[in-house]
């Protein structure tokens, strides 16, 4: 099986109930070719700062992409 994947380089939220307007880069902005090499991003912060909520949003995003790829239906409801 030859799967083509993608990398989540940036996430921008507008009017989110928890994060309001939020923009995060998952790569070094000084890297001119973030899509060429593997990378790892870490979410670090004190308890109660929203790490789990951010991961839930990313999971919802991936689930919606999967639904779209398999059924052609788009139902983004965050």
Image (tube, grey):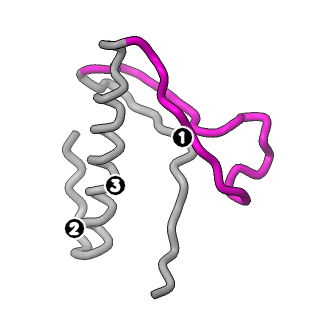
Tell which circle, 1 or 2, labels the residue nearer the N-terminal end.
1
Q: Position of residue 11 (x, y in %)?
A: 47, 38
Range shown magenta: 18-46
Quadrant including the C terminus = top left
Q: Position of residue 8 (x, y in %)?
A: 51, 49
Mark 1 and mark 3: Cα distance apart in space:
14 Å
**Residue assigned mark 2:** 73
Q: Please tell me whether residue 42 belongs to the stretch shown in magenta.
A: yes
Q: Is residue 73 left or right of residue 33?
A: left
Q: Position of residue 57 (x, y in %)?
A: 31, 39
**Residue assigned mark 3:** 62
Mark 1 and mark 2: Cα distance apart in space:
23 Å
- Asked which secondary structure carries label 2, the reply is loop
Residue at (37%, 28%) from the top-left corner? 14
Local packing at callout 3 (Cα closer than 10 Å; few below 14, some 14-19, many 20+) is few
Local packing at callout 2 (Cα closer than 10 Å; few below 14, some 14-19, many 20+) is few
The residue nearer to you, when weighing 13 against 6, is 6
Q: Please tell me whether residue 31 belongs to the stretch shown in magenta.
A: yes
- Asked which secondary structure carries label 1, the reply is strand
Displayed quadrant of residue 38: bottom right
Disc sitting over residue 1 in the figure? none
Displayed quadrant of residue 7: bottom right
Local packing at callout 1 (Cα closer than 10 Å; few below 14, some 14-19, many 20+) is few
Most frequent secondary structure within the magenta stretch: loop
Quadrant including the N terminus = bottom left
Residue at (64%, 39%) from the top-left corner? 27
Q: Considering only vertical position in the picture, is 26 above or below 43?
A: below
Q: Position of residue 63 (x, y in %)?
A: 27, 56
Residue at (79%, 35%) from the top-left corner? 30
The answer to whether marks 3 and 2 mark residues whose Cβ atoms lie closer than 8 Å is no
- Asked which secondary structure carries label 3, the reply is helix
**Residue assigned mark 1:** 10
């Amino acid at each position: 099986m030859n799967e083509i994947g993608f990398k989540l380089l940036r996430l921008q939220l507008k009017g989110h109930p928890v994060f309001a307007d939020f923009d995060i880069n998952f790569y070094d902005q000084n890297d001119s070719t973030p899509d060429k090499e593997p990378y790892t991003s870490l979410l670090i912060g004190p308890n109660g700062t929203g790490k789990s909520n951010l991961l839930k949003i990313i999971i919802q995003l991936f689930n919606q992409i999967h639904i779209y790829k398999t059924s052609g239906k788009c139902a983004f409801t965050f």
